[in-house]
Amino acid sequence: MRCEGQTFVITGANGGMGRATVSRFLEEGAKVVAVDRSFDTKSVLGDCLFVEADLTDEEQVKGIFAKVEEQYGKLDGLINVAGIAQAATPITEVSLLQWEKIMAVNVTSLFLTSREALPLLEKNDGGSITNVASISAVRPRPGLQSYIASKGAAVAFSKALAIECAEKGIRVNVIHPGPADTNMLGQFAPANANADDVKEETFRKSVPLGQLIQPEDIANAALYLSSNEAKNVTGAVLHVDGGRGL
């Protein structure tokens, strides 16, 4: 039980990677605060404190961590899985509103959640923040310029926060998933393309190990980075991508 008695906030908990991460942490004895805009069904995730919130809204994010402090009085870690995709689109067809939405969900949410989590982590004499970015920040694909920019910003933000928080015993790391077998992967398809065909022909075949990344692979990586086994790991970017970044 690597997380017994520990409390973690996991965002994007209703998505494929988020659900797997919640389940993995519960298996290891963690108390989990599962956060998303909404939940299809809560029974699938298990015994969690569920919080429905917009992670781009400052007051709602403050409310998440107020509930954490009220319910548990402490926080050991934050795992930011939440994010949105971009349908492959030439930059000349991307509106400013689309750009701003992607940046808000994929970057601003990291700033807001980290800012609110840090006082609780510091009160706990340390802890960890793990942000899920994307291997596309290393190996870009055409038409995903806004999404890729947001994930590059997530990495830069995480590294800056890692050095800022090191003296407080708070570690900050990044996971770069490769193409993952989730509903979100199909959302990267161009508007008129078949999502399943894109998953197979574009994404699976781009992975040197020959298979899509499973949500459980990301959950295991998050568990490692959040555990004492990674006590001297901070500012790291862990590729869980089947070799896609090579």
Image (cartoon, rainbow, N blue to C red):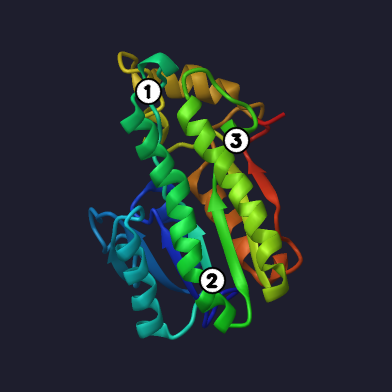
Badge 3 element: helix
- From the viewer's perspective, is the residue at label 1 or at label 3 nearer? 3
| Amino acid tagged 3 | Ile
Q: Residues within 10 Å of mark 3 (few under 14, many from 20)?
A: many
Q: Could you tell me which quadrant the N terminus lies in?
A: bottom right
Badge 1 element: helix
| Amino acid tagged 2 | Leu
Badge 2 element: helix
Q: Which mark is residue 196?
A: 1
Nearer to us in this view, 47 or 132: 132
Q: Which residue is mark 2?
A: 118
Q: Which mark is residue 103?
A: none
Q: Is residue 191 visible?
A: yes
Q: Is residue 123 left or right of residue 239?
A: left
Q: Earlier in the sequence, mark 1 or mark 3?
A: 3
How many angstroms separate mark 2 from mark 1 (CA)? Answer: 40 Å
Q: Which mark is residue 135?
A: 3
Q: Position of residue 19 (x, y in %)?
A: 40, 55
Task: Specify the farthest residue to the front.
Answer: 96
Q: Residues within 10 Å of mark 2 (few under 14, many from 20)?
A: many
Label 1 near label 2: C-beta < 8 Å? no
Q: Residues within 10 Å of mark 1 (few under 14, many from 20)?
A: few
Q: Position of residue 24 (x, y in %)?
A: 49, 62
- From the viewer's perspective, is the residue at label 2 or at label 1 nearer? 2
Q: Position of residue 98 (x, y in %)?
A: 34, 31
